[in-house]
Image: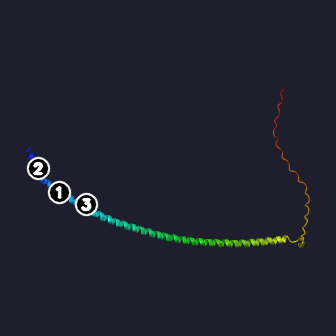
Amino acid sequence: MSIFDRAKKIWNKNAKDVQKTVDAISKDVAAEAADVAKDLTASAQKVARTAGKQVGRAVKDAEKAVASTAKKVEKKVSATAKVVEKKTTAAVKTASKATQSAARTATKTVTKVADKVEKKVTAATKPAAKKPVAKKPVAKKAPVKAAAKPAAKKPVAKKPVAKKAPVKK
């Protein structure tokens, strides 16, 4: 076991130096890790700020687009409403004119018909004395024709009558 004893002796002799080296390395690694963490944090914050600005710009652009689209739609709706209103007004005027024209025509027609009827009534109700009486020709009686012969009767087929069965006593 002399090899083990020798290794143990070397180890024990150098243990303090090894411990110091390990402590120094761990301190260096911790310092490097802290620097890397600071760099990453700064980089992440910078990215977050940039992203925030871009998101903010995108939101503002979207708001502007929505506002302008709403204005355009409002203008088109307003213009369409005006056109519809004009067409409705024109249709009402046209219908009114057509109704008035039809009423005038109907009034004229009714007046003409009423005048004709009135003339006929007055003509019919004039006293009979003023009218010359028209003589009607008397119709002659038609000569009586000889009575027509009655139509010949067709013989009717007789139905067979069942004979009565003799009564048995």
Label 3 Cα crowd, 10 Å radius (few <14 / some 14-19 / many 20+): few
Q: Which mark is residue 37?
A: 3
- Name the secondary structure under disc 1: helix
Left or right of 10? Residue 38 is right
Q: Disc 3 versus disc 2: distance between alpha carbons?
A: 37 Å
Marks 3,2: beta carbons within 8 A: no
Q: Disc 2 versus disc 1: distance between alpha carbons?
A: 20 Å
Dot 1 corresponds to which residue? Answer: 25
Left or right of 42? Residue 82 is right
Identity, as a three-letter code, of the amino acid under mark 1: Ile
Label 2 Cα crowd, 10 Å radius (few <14 / some 14-19 / many 20+): few
Image coordinates for residue 99, horizontal then vertical, percent: 67, 71
Q: Which mark is residue 12?
A: 2
Residue 36 falls in which quadrant of the image? bottom left
Q: Disc 3 versus disc 1: distance between alpha carbons?
A: 18 Å
Q: Is residue 123 above or below residue 1?
A: below
Question: Which residue corresponds to the image point at 40% horizontal and 68% vertical from the top-left?
Answer: 60
* Colouring convention used in this rendered image of the protein: rainbow
Identity, as a three-letter code, of the amino acid under mark 2: Asn
Marks 2,1: beta carbons within 8 A: no
Left or right of 27? Residue 72 is right
Question: Which residue corresponds to the image point at 31% horizontal and 64% vertical from the top-left?
Answer: 47
Image coordinates for residue 40, horizontal then vertical, percent: 27, 62
Question: Which residue corresponds to the image point at 84% horizontal and 72% vertical from the top-left?
Answer: 123
Image coordinates for residue 26, horizontal then vertical, percent: 19, 56
- Name the secondary structure under disc 2: helix
Quadrant containing the N terminus is top left
